[in-house]
Image (spheres, helix red, strand yellow):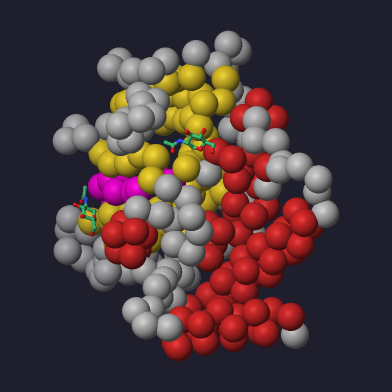
Amino acid sequence: MHASLLLVSALSASVCAAPTFPTISADTAVPDGINAVADYFNLLATKVQESRLLDKAPACDLSQAVLPSSSLPPPSPGVRLKHIAIGRGTQNYTCSTGNPSDAPKAIGALATLFNASCLATTDLDLASALARAALRFDLTQSQTAQKLVPSDLAVSGRHFFLGDGTPFFDLDVSPTWQLGELPCAKNGSAPAPADAPKGLNGEPAVPWLKLTAKQGATGGLQEVYRVKTVGGSAPATCEGMAASFEVQYWFYAK
Ligand SMILES: *[C@@H]1O[C@H](CO)[C@@H](O)[C@H](O)[C@H]1NC(C)=O
Ligand SMILES: *[C@@H]1O[C@H](CO)[C@@H](O)[C@H](O)[C@H]1NC(C)=O
Ligand SMILES: *[C@@H]1O[C@H](CO)[C@@H](O)[C@H](O)[C@H]1NC(C)=O
């Protein structure tokens, strides 16, 4: 009841107002998408209500953040959490043989990272609900707005693959806030939990990962966790070789 009311008002706001922004993509019409968007706005409304009862703003202290638990190896002794980002982008696959029955092979990813340090520290549930909802909004609008639509989170980095296949994170994108750069290698992998949200075409969530720095990392960056994944796995067939994903990246530095 509450969910549909909120969703209707959110939708009609974007129908009445011109120019419309942000636009919910057509994929939202599928029940799963409506639920993800409604869950986010309902949770947000609840949190806003709760925060009215607080007499001060919630603390935003990264040392209080708790990495979501998994079978991945824990952060190494001596590193500390530096940044939490929501990564939104595309995981690319190829079918080099051209045979539609062959399993697609991963060839890299391209993602924009948004600063979720404060949000994930104070409210991991809300950060995770945002990631699920954001997948239903137009990716190019987030890029144009430099915000993770439908939130206010600002761009804090980029993730892509180098020519030799090395995963690379650039956290030097802001002139005022330079965290460093990190070429890395996979150090551990764990399947996403069975109830992890699927992608726009029903593709399962990509595994959770631990990555460790390779030579050339700057800013003391040492380790990255990819957790709370949404979508991104290889499509079932060799058609449509890109899969959108949302993930959280947790960066640790010396
Ligand atoms: C992956 O796909 C994106 C979007 O379609 C594209 O811009 C990018 O160049 C591709 N990257 C690779 C490594 O294929
Ligand atoms: C990320 O957010 C935190 C907390 O609001 C802030 O201290 C930090 O400067 C931000 N970083 C970037 C790159 O915006
Ligand atoms: C993971 O990293 C640890 C610490 O750097 C290292 O000892 C271990 O060999 C690595 N494991 C894999 C599978 O890369």
Q: Quadrant of residue 167?
A: top left
Task: Give 222 or 16, whichever is nearer the viewer.
Answer: 16
The residue sitting at 75% across, 85% down in the picture is: 1
The residue sitting at 50% across, 32% down in the picture is: 83
Q: Eyeballing the image, is 48 above or below 123?
A: below
Main SS category, magenta section: strand
The residue sitting at 42% across, 15% down in the picture is: 220
Is residue 5 left or right of 167 when viewed as pictured? right
Percent x, y of residue 195: 64, 60
Q: Is residue 32 visible?
A: no
Q: Residue furthest top?
A: 78
Q: Is residue 136 visible?
A: yes
Q: Eyeballing the image, is 9 above or below 130?
A: below
The residue sitting at 74% across, 80% down in the picture is: 2
Q: Eyeballing the image, is 2 above or below 176?
A: below
Q: Write the start and end of the magenta stretch as one range.
A: 104-114
